[in-house]
Amino acid sequence: SVAVADIKITSGDTAADINKKVASAINDKRDPTGMYASIDTSGNVKLESLKAG
């Protein structure tokens, strides 16, 4: 799992910066979670399951 406390957010970070950090934190745990996070064209975090089914 990914905890919000694991994501380092600093003063001056934009929403885009924070979304990238969230996606990176999720992807760092990709093997156990089976999830892949990316940023869509609107700048939102998009989650995809990498597990079959």
Image (tube, grey):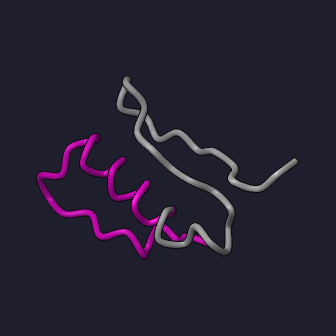
Whole-percent x, y for residue 19 in the image: 36, 47
On screen, residue 43 versus residue 2, left or right, reads left
Looking at this rendering, what residue extends furthest in the top direction? 42
Quarter holding residue 10: bottom left
- Residue 52 is one of the magenta-drawn residues: no
Looking at this rendering, what residue extends furthest in the front direction? 52
Q: Residue at x 69, y 49 (%)?
A: 49
Q: Nearer the viewer, residue 16 or 10?
A: 16
Q: Residue at x 42, y 75 (%)?
A: 6
- Residue 18 is one of the magenta-drawn residues: yes
Quarter holding residue 34: bottom right
Does 25 appear above or below 52? Answer: below
Does 25 appear above or below 23? Answer: below
Q: Nearer the viewer, residue 15 or 20?
A: 20
Whole-percent x, y for residue 24 in the image: 39, 61
Whole-percent x, y for residue 42 in the image: 38, 24
Does 18 appear above or below 10? Answer: above
Which quarter shows the N terminus? bottom right
- Magenta part of the protein: which range? 1-26
Q: Residue at x 42, y 31 (%)?
A: 40
Q: Residue at x 34, y 58 (%)?
A: 21
On screen, residue 24 versus residue 1, left or right, reads left
